[in-house]
Amino acid sequence: MYKKGLLVLLSFLVWIFLIGPVSGQENLYRVAVLPFDDGSIDEHWWGDYDIGTGVADVLVTSMLNLSPKRFRLIEREQIDRVLEEQGFGASDRVDSRSAAAIGKILGVQFIVIGKVTEFSNKTTGGSLSLGGKGLGLKTTTSRVVIDARMVSTDTAEIVAAVGGKGEKKQSNISVDYDWHHIDFNSDEFRATNLGIALRDAADQVAKQLGEKVLAFTPAASAKITGVVAYASDTRVILNVGVNDGVKVGMVFNVLHIIDEVRDPETGEIIDEISETIAEIKVTEVKERSATCSIQKRLSNEFPIAVSDKVVQK
């Protein structure tokens, strides 16, 4: 009797282990974080840096680390490619309508835009030059303040407006960071007061976004979208995969974009004219790609081609 009960318990735990991550993945909201507008720079900053992009990347990490998980995030390379291809400038990234248009192209439910209002690192105390770096007793006060807005890509409505503030003050004997080049992804920068302050601010914003997004339609209702990355007579490879929630057996419609509709006043893309040309089925999935077989061809006018849009059926 004891062995039978133990077997049932072990079977239940295995079942939970197998289905838990899948269920959680289906309920994640698909989000893109655009480079933040930087309103923090003053005369004491110099060198090679991109504060807005760096802050956005740190926020992405904070959003991915939320517990329980809430979001699936688009990679920076994909966002940069769309911004460049569509000709979106810095001013477009802080406008909710333009941001929503970018989000539709990326196939996300929400897009996060924002501004860095303070990014300061003030040090007092003496130092001794040693090997090009300062060594001495210093008091460093670092502050980072960021504002973020989450925009619905369906309506261009701002569904959340949140802020985060981080401050770190420390007195110690330390070696200066080389502020001529700020590498936000380096362990050295993360250990600085400014790196700690930035992480605190980003964590606050991520937590608030995770709470506010629950007031909206569950993410599971959203259809996965992507584009064709490779096409032959028998096989189609998409630019979405396991990281985007794609599974073997899913069916997608392939849409050929015939024309883009632009706002005559702003020039931004507001709609597309497309034709459904094929139905494809996922046969193999990797982290960032999905291989599909062609189930039906619905149009003889347009062959399946790279950059055609795909939408989960």
Image (cartoon, helix red, strand yellow):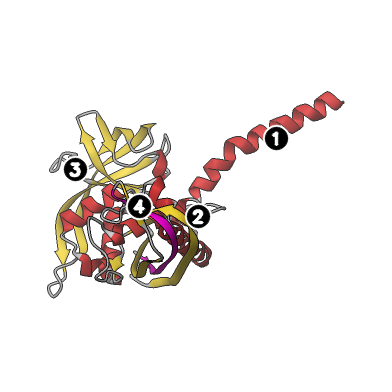
Residue at 27 percent across and 48 percent down: it is: 78
Residue carrying label 3: 299
Q: Which residues are magenta?
A: 132-152
x then y, percent, for residue 303: 16, 39
**Left or right: 132 with respect to 62?**
left
Residue carrying label 1: 12
Q: Reading the chain from its start, which is encountered first: label 3 or label 4?
A: 4
Of tags 1 and 4, the one toward the viewer is 4
Residue carrying label 2: 70
Residue kind at label 3, given as amino acid type = Ser
Residue carrying label 4: 184
Q: Reading the chain from its start, which is encountered first: label 4 or label 2?
A: 2
Alpha carbon separation for disc pair 1 and 2: 25 Å
Q: Residue furthest right?
A: 1
Residue kind at label 4, given as amino acid type = Phe
What is the chief secondary structure element of the magenta stretch?
strand
Alpha carbon separation for disc pair 3 and 1: 48 Å
Residue 206 visible here? yes
x then y, percent, for residue 171: 49, 61
Quarter containing the N terminus: top right
